[in-house]
Image (spheres, rainbow, N blue to C red):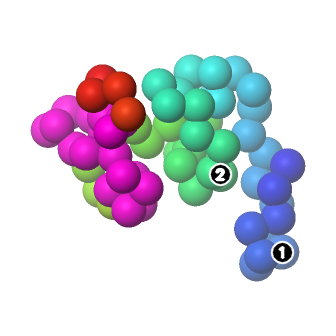
Amino acid sequence: MCNNGNNNISIISTASIRACTHFIFDPEHYRKDGTCRCNDGSHTEMGEWGYKWDGEKWISPEDGE
């Protein structure tokens, strides 16, 4: 459970986090259905975190994945 500062509580299942390619714990990284946004080019926060968009998914700068 995470209080994002707006008094909104987010619940992320461990299954959702495990299914994320990069194991991201930020609640805003997940859609309402629990799927991660690693394949969402409009999720530009990932670029701010150092990930690169390859046209299909965000790739990690550490492993070039």
What range is drawn magenta here? 45-61
Whether residue 53 sits left or right of residue 63 in the image: it is left
The C terminus appears in which quarter of the rendering?
top left
Where is mark 1, residue-wise? 7
Mark 1 residue type: Asn
Identify the mark at residue 39; answer none if there is no mark: none
Whether residue 17 is situated above or below residue 58 in the rendered picture: above
Whether residue 46 sits left or right of residue 30 in the image: it is left
Magenta-span inclusion, residue 3: no
Whether residue 52 is situated above or below residue 21 in the rendered picture: below
Residue 19 horizontal/vertical position (percent):
56, 21
Where is mark 2, residue-wise? 27
**What's the distance in space between the residues labelled 2 and 1, CA to CA?**
13 Å
Which residue appears at 74% of the width and 68% of the height? 4
Quarter-of-image position of residue 63: top left
Which residue appears at 85% of the width and 49% of the height? 1
Which of the marked residues, 2 or 1, is nearer the chain's N terminus?
Answer: 1
- Binning the other alpha carbons within 10 Å of mark 1 as few (below 14), some (14 to 19) or many (20 upward) gives few
Whether residue 50 is situated above or below residue 22 in the rendered picture: below
Residue 9 horizontal/vertical position (percent):
82, 60
Which residue appears at 83% of the width and 75% of the height? 7
Nearer the observer, 46 or 43: 46
